[in-house]
Image (cartoon, rainbow, N blue to C red):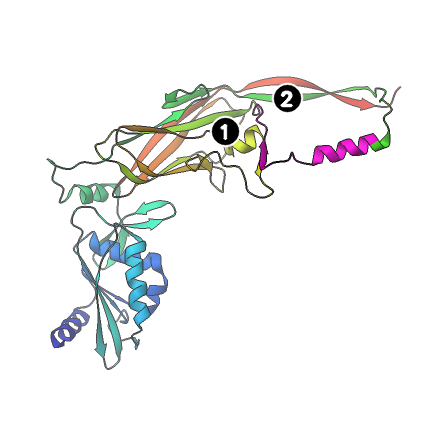
Amino acid sequence: MSSEIDLVDDLIRSGEGLTVDFKRLEIISNSVKLAALMVAFGNTCGGRILIGVNDDGSIEGMREKKEHETHIMNIARDKCAPPIIPEFSVSRKEGGDIYVVKIARYRKIPYAVITGEGNVYFIRVGSTVRLASPNELALLFEADQDSASSKKPVLDLLLIDGEGNAVKEIHAEPIFVKRILRKSAKPDEPMLPSAFLAAAKILRAVPPLGLGSFEERAPPKDLIPIGIQIVNKGEIPAQGVRLTLQFPADCEIIEKRDAVGGISVGPILPYRPNSGGLFAGKDRHEAYARIDTLGNDLTCSFEKIYVRFPQLERQYKIQGHITQHGFPPTDLEFLVSVKPKIVEEVVEEYGEDQ
């Protein structure tokens, strides 16, 4: 026990650096920040986090609680990929207790923080935590790998056009309707009993009986259908795959259910084609899909979305992004060449008879 106390004293005297970081107790309430710190140590040289120590090396005055250890270990397990198993100990000082969280360097697969946008990789640079650059990330994955025996997924992503072809570039001719008003005399209306008209209105408002309804119709002609196809050409399955397509800000993504018909499952639940569908993000400029496991030598296609582009003849760049558990992210670029057509449509505007 005395040797551990002496080690902590030495670490505090030496100050923060590549393998030591001081943190106040409040760090454990920020799971992402603590996970990033663990990941950064694991991806560099390993190291120790001393919780309960101020930046200047003074003791914060924290008192040990058993639930703190459980919470720290849960963050290491649930917020890091692959899970980190740190060594945890408590060093008791006159001024307060100190948690010592020791992180070992990764052996085969670099560590990442699990976020809603995919896995994010950090490294330690001096006494700071930095987001790993593409080159640094590539080096992490190359290190400690046996090139003769390493196997990995190799994922390739393509767009699917309106005719079902898997391509890198889509050529589309959306049709935009220009409405022209034409005034006409108001036609004679048939005389129907008011009770009949009221009943018809009620019937139109009542949905069909059953668990739900979905009456597919042709989508508006100014929408371009786009799907995605992903292939695993590697030697092992891919795990925890997330696919993202980012469109320019002047585009609008519309999901299939909104483009081809309304649906409800019962009175509440919205329609989803399948659990592995291609869906629009909140800002309507991003589409995403998830796959739990994609086997090797396997192709997977996703339900299409529809995209409304501006009425301009132009080539758009679409950014593709693939993340998967345990391997570096992949960035791709696709093209959509748009050549819009304008069609005039006459709309009658009825007025009083002259």
- Please give the name of the residue rendered at 13% of the width and 45% of the height, measured from the top-left corner: 144
Residue 153 vs residue 227: left or right?
left
Q: Is residue 120 visible?
A: yes
Report the amino acid beneath label 2: Lys
Graded by Cα atoms within 10 Å as few (under 14), some (14 to 19) or many (20 or more), the crowding at tag 2 reads: few
User: Which percent across, then down, holds residue 159?
Assistant: 39, 26
Tell me the number on the disc at residue 37. Answer: none
In the displayed orientation, state which residue is furthest to the right: 354
* Quarter in which the C terminus is drawn: top right
Q: Name the spot of residue 351 as percent of width and height, x first.
A: 83, 23
Distance of label 2 from label 1 (alpha carbons): 20 Å
Q: Which corner quadrant of the image does residue 4 belong to?
A: bottom left
Q: Which amino acid, mark 1?
A: Tyr
The front one of 337 and 141 is: 141
Residue 287 forms part of the magenta stretch: no
State which mark lies toward you, 2 or 1.
Answer: 1
Quarter holding residue 142: top left
> For mark 1, what is the residue?
306
Which residue is tagged 2? 178
Q: Nearer the viewer, residue 235 or 212?
A: 212
The residue range painted magenta reads: 196-220
**Residue pictured at 50% horizontal, 29% vertical:** 306
Badge 2 marks a residue whose secondary structure is strand
Q: Is residue 115 above or below residue 280?
A: below
Q: Is residue 244 left or right of residue 44?
A: right
Up the image or down, 123 lies above or below 204; here it is: below
Looking at the image, residue 223 lies above or below residue 59? above
For the N terminus, the quadrant is: bottom left
Name the secondary structure under disc 1. strand
Which is nearer the N-term, disc 2 or disc 1?
2
